[in-house]
Image (cartoon, coloured by chain):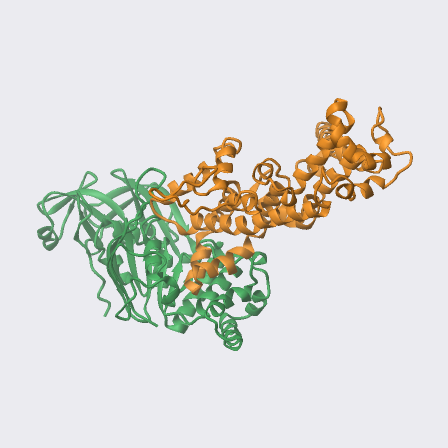
Chain colours: A green, B orange
Amino acid sequence: MAGVTLDHVSKRYHTLTADGRPVTGLDDVSLHIADGEAVSVVGPSGCGKSTLLKVIAGLEMPDAGRVLFNDVDVTRWPAQARGVGMVFQDYALYPAREGEDNLSYYFEVRKRTEEEKARRVREVATLMGIGFDLLLERQVDTLSGGEKQRVGIARCIVRDPNVFLMDEPISNLDAKLRERTRIEIKRLIKAFGITTVYVTHDQQEAVFMGDRIAVMRAGRIEQFGAFDDLYFSPANLFVATLIGTPPMSVLPAVRRAETLELAGTSLPLPPDLAAELPAEPLRLGVRPEGWLLDPPGAALTLPIRHVERIYTERAAYAAGDLAGSPVHVLVPLDFPAQAALRIAPDWERSYFFAAEGEAALRVPGPPDLF
Amino acid sequence: MLFPTVGRKQWQVRLGWYGVQVLLWTGVILHLIPFYLMLVTSIKPASEAMAMPPTLWPKEPTFVAWRLVWQISDVAQSVLSQPLYRYFLNSLIMTFGVIALSIPVTSLAAYASSKLIKGPLARPLFIFFIGTLMMPGIVTLIPSFLLTRNFPFPLPVAPTIPGTDIAFPTLRIWNTYWAVIIPAGFSAGNFLLFKGFFDSIPDSIINAARVDGGSEFNIFRRIVLPMSKPVYAVTIYFTFGGVWDSYLWPLVVIQDSAIAPLTVAIRRITDAFSYAGTTSPMTAMGAASALQPLIEQGLSWNGLMVLGLLQALPVFIFFIIAREYLMQGVRIQGLK
């Protein structure tokens, strides 16, 4: 087991994408993952998160910077020597081999004994749960997607890896299986306590799998922290809008003295907040739960486009447009059908961003629960 | 399927179905007629083999031609200096020599080009290899021939080292088996087939094997090779057929008739027969007199058919053996 440190790692690719731009690599990425910690890396496709994983695995060599496992510089070590375990989105099982032979390739190339191999495979089969030994006897092209990924995960843990690397392991599975496999992986990560880097483009998955989450864009890490940090203290507008479903509503606004001009309405600001904000155009971000319904005093009128009821989560969202931007408001599940809604931002739970660029001017910060 | 069973109740679909059947069967029959005629003619007596119009089935089937063909070299030394099996052997040596050299070289080159070479050099290298396909073989025939004399000089006689009268050491493969084997050591066509197949293997499989600790060659041998049987079957089959049936190149680079392949030997016999049977008495004389004893015993075009069948047989047998993999290969690559 090992902690993983990336120290100012950069990677550029020579190949170009279809529209002639260079493929995103990594741009001065620094990251420290503690021993036994599970970290999710989330970002839109092409943000370099898979490259990050490959650099940790040793499948890509960085142009600059260092990769350390437990203070050992492994930057120039090939993948073969690093002892990591990797799970791939497309399973990457060896097609000409049976399930069990997929697990045993690691032992074959290391000239380990048959007994050790058999013992490890048995142990892993027990860990993986009921019916797993049946999968091992089958040719891999007869396995379903979920079964393939179970074999893929088993292949990864059979070696007792230093680091688990997971590259969108469940995004090719159907919804129900995805849920089950997600819990299964989480269980295994907890059971082994192995350092894990989990790459995904789905922020909910990232929140579920990782103790901490790294948000990436265009080869850079925008923010790295626990869910509460990302959610309540986003470093910039990109992180703020990426984390959270439905996404935060972002509305153009102008502060004038003690009021905020928002979508043609003047809303009075609390004095301390007014003092904090610059008297210029800015952007207001409000999460669906950050709106006050039917507040006393000045309020915005949101014409309701539709109401989305999510019964499993006992919640409903009213959707509409304000000043040309989509707005989602959390409403009770038994919210009656109506044409419009009076709302006002809850200043305690509002985010403020500069009108130009993405800098955060003021964020609420994680709530003090105790 | 082109025509699902359920659709055949509609008359248009049924008509289409029958049309396709007719076309396919016509194709099959057209392909089989020459083979049938060869087979039938090879068991006809000499006079009937030459009869006009030809008979569809011999009146008295006989294997005399099959027997006499094996005796050509005993009787007509001037036409064929070695027994027939010797030419078979020569062809086999060349064919398997080329396969043993070119398949590993070409497939490893294609694998490297597909999975190992990254960066700005990858594409020019690929274009270079493929570029060799652009040159028609006949254009490079004479330069290639000259290269076999004193490699790397395209000269019949090796130049001397300046200031001395010692000739440069050169590789002389002309008039040896190597002259056929070495130039065929890399095949751009097979390279393209291999690369197309290796490109279809996801990088993640190779990466998974790297993470598992396999060296690049071990990954190729233990992971990639077992997946690639169909493409190997296809390329080996094409190479086998190509070298076994090659005529012009061996004719140019092999002068010693003892190491000539079967194609060259068969051509020599055919020539002797054609002169004996058809052209002017003057030119016919030499060859005819050499073959006279055999002709008297009943050898004519029936013998040539025997030789043709012997030439075609190994490729056919190879096809039967590798049929399963070849079909997979054709499905994978959609070629032919």
Front residue (pair B215, B236):
B236
| Residue B207 coordinates in the image, percent (x, y) | 42, 57
Does B170 appear above or below A37? above
Tell me if I can see residue A344 in this picture.
Answer: yes
Q: State the residue in front, A266 or B172.
A: B172
- Image quarter (top left, top right, bottom left or bottom right) of the N terminus of chain B: top right
Q: Is residue A110 above or below residue A167?
A: below
* Picture coordinates of residue B243, whole percent (x, y): 60, 42
Quarter assignment of residue B7: top right
Depth check, front residue: A210 or A101: A101
Q: List x then y, in percent, for residue A54.
A: 35, 57
Q: Quadrant of residue B17?
A: top right
Q: Is residue B74 left or right of residue B119?
A: right
Q: Residue furthest right?
A: B60
- Figure check: B50 above or below B111: above
Viewer-closest of B264 and B217: B264
- Whether residue A291 appears in this view of the structure is no
Q: Is residue A274 left or right of residue A159?
A: left
Residue A61 in picture, x, y percent from top left = 31, 57
Q: Relative to A227, say whether B18 is above or below.
A: above
Q: Quadrant of the C terminus of chain B?
A: top right
